[in-house]
Image: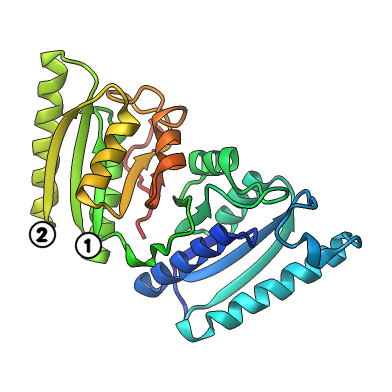
Amino acid sequence: MGTTNKHILVPIDFSEVSLNVLRHSVYTAKIIGAKITMLHVIETYSSNSSISKEIGENNNQDAIKRVVQEKFDELVEKYKNEGIDFNIIISEGKIYKKITDVAEEIDATGIFMATSGASGFEKIVGTNALKVAKSAKCLVTTIRGTEDVTKYGYKNILLPLDLSKETREKVKVAIETAQQFGSKIRIISVTTSKDEFIVNKLRAQLKQVTGLVTEQGINATSKLVEGANIAKAVLEYAHEIEADSIFIMTQQELGWVDQIIGSAAQQIMNHSEIPIISIRPADRKDLTSFVKPY
């Protein structure tokens, strides 16, 4: 595809869900003109790992790397007609740390990763996905199932809002992504309080953001809902409107989420049947710098 500044990093453990994530990243890379780096991190192998049978008892580093390289070669061959430049990295270390380090090294536009996988060495799940989403400086898309998500493509984005200053970063990224993919944006705020002051502020913000989005020529709707469980309310609304992606922040947000990465965001990431796009807010000292959109 030639030279491109857009670069997607895909950690792969060769479980079915991680291969589904790769399929989604290929779909996205074709649309935005990105190259893909496939990363496998060697940490600990067990008898339950996806490729343990192929490695056998001779599970030294050279044997592991040989099998991993062969599997990567098969994947490159599989997608050779998609017009995408692939890069392969086989590395050792702590999985979440290695993912974030490599993402910085290659100046990744985004990371696509699974939130579930095989047992054993495939630890690109659970806490690792959460740590990557929290610490990565680029967008992080997490996918938990094996359903073919290439049918989505960010055409119907769900954008939850709170009252924090960081929210405006999420809005900007959602707008730019919607412009790239020709998407609709469905905006939601969840109130766990009946305090009229808070409710009115949320309503005012919904109106303001909806106007901002529509000014950019994007189809947008907004809704304020009450709910005791924020994650549940967001996921139920996502199902109701048939959203194909949800944009969340990955560090502490104020307003309707007190600890977004510790509770609501983690619940959304762990239970959503559709891709979750996580955005790490800029440092409070410099809220003018934003994460690059896809």
Q: Tell me the element at label 1.
A: helix
- Most foreground residue, 169 or 192: 192
Q: Quadrant where the C terminus lies?
A: bottom left
**Residue at left 25%, top 61%?**
155
In the picture shown, does residue 113 fall above or below 28? above
Q: Position of residue 266 (x, y in %)?
A: 45, 35
Category of crowding for the residue at label 2, using alpha-carbon neighbours closer than 10 angstroms: few (below 14), some (14–19), many (at least 20): few
Quarter-wise, where is residue 183 in the image? bottom left
Give the residue at mark 2.
Answer: 217
- Most foreground residue, 267 or 140: 267
Q: Tell me the element at label 2.
A: loop
Q: Position of residue 63 (x, y in %)?
A: 85, 66
Give the residue at mark 1.
Answer: 179
Of the residues under marks 2 and 1, which one precedes in the sequence? 1
| Badge 1 amino acid | Gln
Image position of 231 (left or right of 143): left
Q: Position of residue 28 (x, y in %)?
A: 39, 67
Q: Quadrant where the N terminus lies?
A: bottom left
